[in-house]
Image: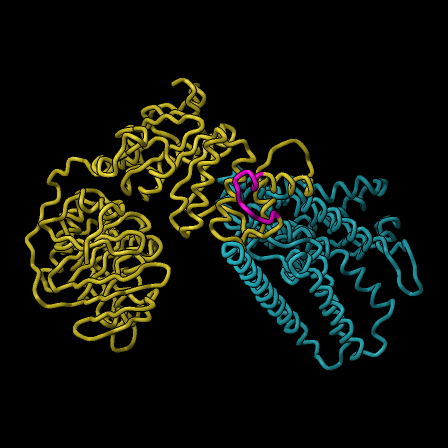
Chain colours: A yellow, B cyan
Amino acid sequence: MSNAVLRLDHISRLFGMTVALADMSIVLHPGEVHAIVGENGAGKSTMIKIMTGIHQPSGGTIFVDGEPRQISGPQAAREAGIAAIYQEPMVFPDLDVTENIFISDTSAGLWVRPAEQRKRARALIERIGMKLDPDRIASGLTLAEQQAVEIARALSQDVRVLIMDEPTASLSAHEASQLRQIATTLAEQGVAVVYISHRLEEIFEIADRVTVIRDGAHISTKPISEVTSDGMIAEMVGREVGNYFAKAPGTVTDKTVLEVRDLTLDGVFEDISFDLHAGEVLCMAGLVGARRTDVALSLFGITPATSGNINYRGEDTWFSSPRQAIDAGIAYVSEDRRKLGLAMPMPIKSNISLATLDEFLSPRGLLDREREDSVANEYRERLNIRTGSVETPVGMLSGGNQQKVMLAKWLNMKPDLLIFDEPTRGIDIGAKAEVHDLIRDFVARGGAALVISSDLPEVLAMGDRILVMREGRQMGILDTGEATQEAIMSMATGQLEQAV
Amino acid sequence: MLNRISPQTLRILALLAVLALVLLFFSTQVPNYLNGRLFNRISSSVAIMAIVACAQTLVILTRNIDLSIGSTLGFVAFATGSLITNNPELGPALLLIYSICLGACFGVVNGALVAYARIPSIIVTLATMALFRSALVEYSDAKSITTGNLPTWLVDFPNYKILTFGSYQLRASFLLAVVVVIIVHIALTRLRAARKIYAVGSNPEAAEMAGINSKRVVLTAFVLAGALAGLAGFMFLARFGTITVVAGLGFELKSVAASVVGGVNIFGGSGSVIGAFIGAVLVDLIDMSLVRWQLVSEFWREAVLGTLILLSVAADATLMRRLVAWRVAREKARIQRSTQS
């Protein structure tokens, strides 16, 4: 069709050595709701960032109204009529609704006309079918209202392509249906709506066409009537699995380390129940927003659950702070190395000793530097941390080596239970295999590991059992034998639920 | 009623109430307190601080701070003084423009380093505070500007009486300060471009996404602040006549205090220059009243000021949080009612 408003043609994008987008092509027409689905890391966010000018493509061409065009920045994207709203709205908390809507209004005039703006704001809010007082300060709005403000802002700039990235992920059911209504309304008014969601039922409700992407490439685009959920899932996961992660022999024992029953954190997750044995790796799989990390944070005492039972090493326990969990021998390796894991400017050895400083005290109460050195060197050898010296600041290491330093820090605590949150995110394949070996080695020595991972091949290779979550609910636990990418994906997208 | 008033207006009303309370309190403590002399003294001294606080507010709104503002003021006061000493024939307008432009130049240095070299403003302006001051020492060559060498129109200007009610005098310097504050206030609330200052301070990431050039906004804020500091330098020269190398020392912290007491959020994004103006009046009033209050020794004046800053910020934060929580609760109740029906 010639009336495409936006077309990506064989777009690629590299970040250093990492390929975020390999070969992405997509055509958007006015008046359609175009859903885009794909696994975590399939390249959805990168694609949005290219459409909105935040990233520049490494290769390929973008066409706006059939003309090749460079979208050099957010300003250029706006001029082309492209806007995006995200799960976390981008509002100005100190400004009111009207000011938020017209923040980047470039229409003529030096002065603001408040009365006129308020009238226009009211009209825009009405156009998307919301009820909202234009004088309210944004910091007091609900998430859904903030999103509505963002949509109204986009409309005020004559948006022609509106990208909605997981817009309903943090909304209540009622708010979510309101938002879907807005998406449909806008499409009827001639806007091309790009709708990205993990909730397949939403897509069947509102999408006109569905594009599946995988590993940074376009897989298929079909009218919604020709799509089934099974077909979509097969396309989302259907990569050649290859055998780059060898399945290690199981070391599971009968000794139960952790018994979790009906763990619930109100409004976040509910009724999570599982056992974890010494020598076992239990993987938690699910899509973004499945609340797996929240479960881990509750187990670790950061955000204690509101109800349920935790039995740890044969005793009913309840951790209300990370200190208690650490003292009991639980370690949590965060997914966010930069923010929660490592002190980047500090040397490797200081990072390793950080969680267990008491062990490094000399009798005089000072830090025993030699011991710090020897322990750090021991881990450097054992974990194969590639560096000239343990004095190197962690920030100068590669992602894989940083991850190993983080592991060393927690292993030095000699924990009984290790919780890994995305242990191999953003590190290269060789380092991934090494991290897998380390986790395996840890459980072979009698430890228990809970591994949260969004990487399906990794989950299948690592997990002795796999717990699948979806939007705060436990969809089922799969044994190695019955677990396939398709089975996990069906559960993660809510197409299949295991009977309890 | 409470829901019609914007938090900003509420803040100003609260400040005015505090101002009234302070006046009331001291009038019971200090004999012969409320009179024209107090008004005249405060209005003369606050005239300069109000403009500096106004400048500081512009910078703070963008989530930055300008610690070099006192040094800028001092340098401009001295340079303007030496210009008119050497060229007595220069007219008022030219001299004023010279002051403002010179101040703006200092603002360009600060703004460029903060916005384009990406150095945190507290570090940049801490450094330029010392640098500008040293530049002044070098430039002054150990000499001072003295009143005797200044033209009479300049020296007489600050105390020129516009209006007189008994012992209450409306002096030119105070009027000028009030006019500047009002102009900046109108510009900040009504100018399309000024909204960007609030946006950048409120949510820098969202501002970038909305296509706002935050670097240019930050630079502009610093340049405007410099220009206002230049104007304040001009008034400083006119008021004191005698300018040494320590001119304007301490203004940087006092201006931050005035802004913060006046309800300007130190993390940017909210606040008004009217608030900063009242904050400046309040700080000055308390400072001056304590001198006359026998109960508090000289040495405790700073402590009282420090306490005031802490109290006002804490009270502001608590009040605003309450207000927001109250409105959210009310809104929720409204939604619940409408979904039930």
The image quadrant of residue A32 is: top left
Tell whether A340 sits left or right of B279: left
Residue B141 or residue A169, whichever sits in front: A169
Residue B55 rendering spot, x and y as whole percentages? 67, 51
Relative height, residue A358 to residue A461 (above, below): below
Q: Is residue A127 magenta?
A: yes
Residue at image coords 74%, 67%: B19
Confirm whether residue A398 shows in the render: no
Which stretch is magenta? A124-134
Image-based side of A323 in relation to A241, left or right: right
Screen quadrant of the N terminus of chain A: top left
Where is residue A410 drawn, in percent x and y?
Answer: 23, 62
The residue positioned 61% from the left and 64% from the top of the image is: B316
What is the number of callouts on the image? 0
Indicate whether A341 appears above or below B217.
Answer: below
Q: Residue at x 22, y 45 (%)?
A: A490
Q: Given the current orientation, which residue lies at the most extreme bottom position?
A: B295
Is B183 one of the magenta-colored residues? Answer: no
Percent position of residue A19, x then y: 27, 35
B230 with respect to A466 (left or right): right
